[in-house]
Amino acid sequence: MRRPLLLSLAVLLVGAALPPSAPAAGPTDPQLTIYAGDGTQGAPVPGPALASPRSSTSAMDVTADGTLYALDLVDHVVERITPDGELTIVAGDGTADPFTAGPARSSGLGGLTYALAAEDDGTLYVGDWGSGQIARITPDGRLSVFAGDGTRGLPVDGPATSSPLGYVVGLDTDAAGNVFFALQDQFAVVRITPGGTLTRIAGTGDGGPMTDGPALASTMVPRGGTVLPDGTYYVSSGIPSIARIADGDLRVVDTTISTPVGMSHDEDGRLYVASNAGARITRLGADGSAPTPVAGDMTNGLFAFTPGDPLASSFFSTVVAADPSGVVYTIDYPKQIGRVGPAVPSRPRAVTAVAGPDGAVTVGFVPPANRGLTAITGYEVSADGGDTWAPLDTTAAPGGRRTGRVEGLAVGTHAMQVRARNASGAGFVPAQPRTVVVAPAAPAETPGAPEGPVGTPAAAQPAPATTPAAVATPPARPAAPAKPARPVRRAPSVCTAKRRVRLHWRVRRGTPVRAVTVTVDGRRVHALPGDARSAVVTVMSRRTRVSTVRIVATTTGGRRLTSTRTYRLCAPRRARTLPTTVLRPAR
């Protein structure tokens, strides 16, 4: 009669000895999945990326729409992988011959290509160690030599094609179209303008540890790099450190990551570093703060991607590429490309909400930078900051945007949010809702309507209460007496002869600020700590002559302090600079 008791006790003891099982990853948790490669080694084959062999991927980059570009060191081609997983060859004839001007598919890519950058329009830059040159490939598939005279040496300021170069690493472009890179063997960092003018911006030409101070006075041993939209360049060094280069100044921001190599960044300015002899991907704040492991178990395994928990997989990689939302791509040397990110879509971008005279609200946005593991199946909208959601029918709009119309909202203020869905579930939402005020609709004139005394309209019957067609909101309160319209405050206009502008701002003394963001024409270019009081931005692209810059400081209590200015391009003799702007409560 005691056996059942003993058996039960044994089961309890064994159960107590077992470690608790980890909770299963949810659709919003980062997961490691195989993104490209069938596990065999060989030349890539156009078609489904998961069904293609792969060789040694030496560099990658990803554009704002989620298109991934990969440089194949062994097969001498550049591959494009679309968000729906289709692989095509866009450059390279499969040989190690030097760059040849003309069709990109008919040119060799050199023998030692370790650098690749992709602009959002599909323009590519490829760096070849063998020739010491950089090629530019246009979206229509034409290749030309962009930089380098074919010799190695310390770069010389002036025309980029007349300068010696060397081993190009950390190739990247900023929002203004400037090309940045480091030279591993020449111990320097270089910037080339869209017009082809080369300038050395950091490095003495001697190897050594990086030191704070004038960037051109610092030694370095570059291994990789990345540039933010405003032209701030980050470089990793073989003498373990990562430094920020801006406005001629170099500052070391991290010395904790062992052997940092490949680098990338997201739209919030966070850095992603392939490090520790290829065994880990680490995320850093733009100021080097909060180093966070993203992927890799530090065991340096070959051919060893393990789908699931990114921190439980071993792999060997010095290559990393991050899309704007922070989804990371890396390689399992040499056969596969892995994706580290949630299964659901990332947040929509550049969201707007505008109320019309009929009481309807038009919501516009740029679709998520990453669709998740499956295609987006639809969008949802909320008018109460995300508490309740309803489907949103959208249509394509200019500039790659989508718009949808929300009807039936009650009179009053609404906090509009939008999100995408796929087969895994609802995606992420923007950090802040868009506030919109729905005003009472103007009454329509009815012919023959009865009138009261002269100048006094007849009593109107109250309109029946309505519920929103797309979003459930509380019934509207009776409208308060109309207040006199507040005059519209126009943003101060600044006339500038330069596209790179340094902003200065201040807040009321004693105001605790948690974070500061800076946007240019609705696109976030800086996410800064609360004590920041200046930043450099690039205004006016090559196609526009006016830009709107907005600074938003969020206090520890959640209040928002803002300032908005409009910058216009003008002749140097007319240029002027406004004094430090004061951030005031958002209206």
Image: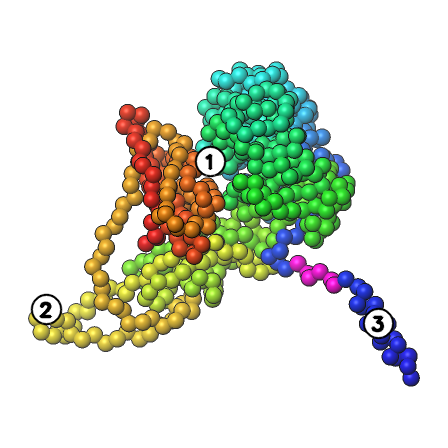
Front position in the image: 174 or 345? 174
Measure how far apart labels 1 and 2 are at the Cα level: 59 Å
Instruction: Confirm whether residue 493 shows in the render.
Output: yes
Q: Could you tell me residue 338's position as x and y percent?
A: 67, 45
Q: Residue 188: where, in percent of width, then height?
A: 58, 23
Quarter holding the N terminus is bottom right
Q: Which residue lies furthest to the front in this view?
A: 510
The kind of residue on which mark 3 rests is Val
Contact check, label 1 and label 2, Cβ < 8 Å? no
Q: Residue at x 45, y 46 (%)?
A: 530
* Image position, residue 9 (x, y; %): 85, 74
Q: Name the residue under label 3.
A: 11
Q: What stretch is highlighted in magenta?
A: 20-25
Q: Disc 2 marks which residue? A: 455
Dot 1 or dot 3: first in sequence order is 3
- Relative to 356, say whether 160 is above or below: above
* Distance from the alpha carbon under mark 1 to that under mark 3: 62 Å
